[in-house]
Image (spheres, rainbow, N blue to C red):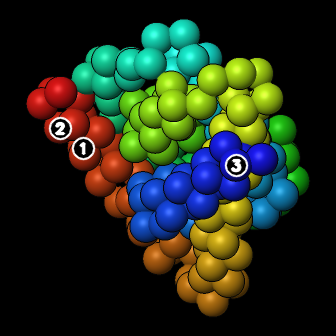
Amino acid sequence: MYAFVLSLAVIFVAELGDKSQLMAMTFATRFRALPVLIGITAATGLVHLASVAVGAALGAALPTGPISILAGLAFLGFALWTLRGDELDDEERDKAKRASGSAILAVGTAFFLAELGDKTMLATVTLAADHGGLLALTGVWAGSTIGMVAADGLAIVVGQMLGRRLPERVIKYGAAAGFAIFGVLLLVEGATA
């Protein structure tokens, strides 16, 4: 239980103001809240499960340079996709909003790539390296996953509120700019790692 509570608290605090939380807010302005939350939860669960396995087996972090470059390129792609995606007519836009599966896939992929080598992943590796035994490692995985999803859930609520109050054009350009900024930051991080 100690590993669970510690992991939940550490990851929740580490996620506040992180790029992943800003991504959650951005996605929530574009898609319904439930598919965004499902995508975040699935990606976080997978990344943190791998983090716990790495931490338990090796006690060391994964090389972050190439992973950050791949994630940066993906984010630049998401920026272009966001700009292009708003050229749909009203009927196609309504279909896209109802397509929860594609939103889950887009959010899940973005979060999976963004979290590889991120501070929350490395914190989870470190927490797992410090806690032995299957029960403690399960606590690290569950706590870190729930902590991150809770922090990103707050961002989803804010994103949904902004999405109802801001004009669609502002959302489109703001989301594209956000993805482009995250992409460039990840490319720089990867190149300097």
Q: Residue furthest top?
A: 57
**Three-letter amino acid code at the position of disc 3:** Tyr
Does the image show residue 62?
yes
Residue at image position (47%, 76%) is 170
Image-quadrant location for residue 150: bottom right
Residue 22 in the image, given as x and y percentages of width and height? 48, 63
Circle 3/circle 1 CB separation < 8 Å:
no
- Kindly report the distance in space between the C-alpha atoms of the residues bearing marks 2 and 1: 6 Å
Badge 2 vs badge 1, beta-carbon distance below 8 Å: yes
Circle 3 packing at 10 Å, graded few (<14), some (14-19), many (20+), is few
Q: Nearer the viewer, residue 156 or 162?
A: 156
Where is 39 relative to 116, above or below? below
Q: Nearer the viewer, mark 3 or mark 1?
A: 3
Q: Position of residue 10 (x, y in %)?
A: 53, 55
Q: Which secondary structure, mark 2?
A: helix
Locate residue 87 relative to residue 78 in the image: left or right: right
| Residue 145 seen anywhere in this rendered image of the structure | no
Residue beneath label 2, please? 188
* SS at circle 1: helix
- Residue under pointer 1: 184
Whether tag 2 and tag 3 are in contact, CB under 8 A, the answer is no
Residue 87 position (above or below residue 54)? below
Mark 2 against mark 3, which lies toward the viewer? 3
Graded by Cα atoms within 10 Å as few (under 14), some (14 to 19) or many (20 or more), the crowding at tag 1 reads some
Q: CA distance from mark 2 to mark 3?
A: 37 Å
- 3D distance between C-alphas at marks 3 and 1: 38 Å
Residue at horizontal 44%, vertical 19%?
A: 59
Residue at the image position 60 percent from the left and 60 percent from the top: 9
Residue 40 is situated, as x and y percent measured from the top left of the image, at: 68, 46
**Residue at the location (34% across, 49% down)?**
182
Q: What residue is shown with label 3?
A: 2
Q: Amino acid at mark 1?
A: Val
